[in-house]
Every structure is written in structure tokens, then in C-alpha cells.
Image: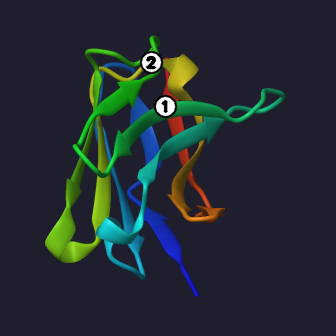
Amino acid sequence: QVQLVESGGGLVQAGGSLRLSCAASVSIFNMNRVGWYRQAPGNQRELVARIITDGGSTTYADSVKGRFTISRDNAKNTVYLQMNNLKPEDTGVYYCYAYIPYRDYWGQGTQVTVSS
């Protein structure tokens, strides 16, 4: 059973930083891709950042480029999302996501709230 457990969310003022962690119960090398999505109230879930594990290429939403960085620690089976210069519009529930052939896996989500 694949499990993804997020941590690191919280309340922060605009301009502040948070680092989210996603601990996986399986090796990252088992995943084709792994990353973070977020969902704000009333909005659809959207991609924030993603790593293609074979090669390490990354993708970021335009709204977070230059502010967020996705990284991984293969030895710890953990993926991180460093979020800097946070804005109120970054508020939402952040979900860790992984694709392991042939299905998607999701964490339970962690709340990030950015106050103005």
C-alpha cells in the first residue's frame, strides 16, 4: 500500500516562507513523477510543481516560478516544496501526488494559509 504523508503547512504572513514535506512509503524511484498540487476554496485542484523522476526535470505553475522550489531526498523517500515570498493567493490545501504505473496516489493534504 502506497502512502504519502504531507507535513509543514501552517499560517504565515505574506512574504514569509514554509517548507512542505511529503514522506512516501515506497522508494521515489518507483514513481514516474511526483509533485504538489493545491486547491483553494471554490477552485479546482491545480498543479504547483512536479518532478519527473527519470532525469529530474521539473515543472512549475507560472504563478509560483521563482518563488517555489521542489526537491527530493531519495534516501528518505521524501519530496519537499520550499515556498518563499508567499502571497495570500497561495492559500489552499496542498496535496502530495505520485504516479506509479498505472495509478495516481494522493496524500491527505496540508493546509497553507497566507495572511495579508
Please name the amino acid that badge 1 sits on: Val
Residue drawn at point x = 31 percent, y = 19 percent: 15
Which quarter of the rendering shows the N terminus? bottom right
Residue drawn at point x = 56 percent, y = 32 percent: 47
Residue at the right extreme? 42
Please say if the residues under marks 2 and 1 sit with CB atoms less than 8 Å apart: no
Say whether residue 78 is left or right of residue 32. left
Q: Which residue is mark 2?
A: 87
Say whether residue 103 is left or right of residue 94. right
Image quadrant in which you'd find residue 108: bottom right
Residue at the top extreme? 62
Choose mark 2 or mark 1, whichever is in front.
1
Quote the CA–CA distance across marks 2 and 1.
14 Å
Residue 78 locus on image (x, y percent): 29, 66
Q: Earlier in the sequence, mark 2 or mark 1?
A: 1
Please say if 23 is above or below 9: below
* Residue in front for this viewpoint, 96 or 34: 34
Element under disc 2: loop
Residue 54 locus on image (x, y percent): 28, 50
Circle 2 packing at 10 Å, graded few (<14), some (14-19), many (20+), is some
Please name the amino acid that badge 2 sits on: Lys
Residue 56 locus on image (x, y percent): 23, 42
Residue drawn at point x = 42 percent, y = 34 percent: 49
Q: Which residue is mark 1?
A: 48
Image quadrant in which you'd find residue 21: bottom left
Circle 1 packing at 10 Å, graded few (<14), some (14-19), many (20+), is many
Residue at the bottom extreme? 1
Please say if 64 is above or below 79: above
Please say if 36 is above or below 116: below
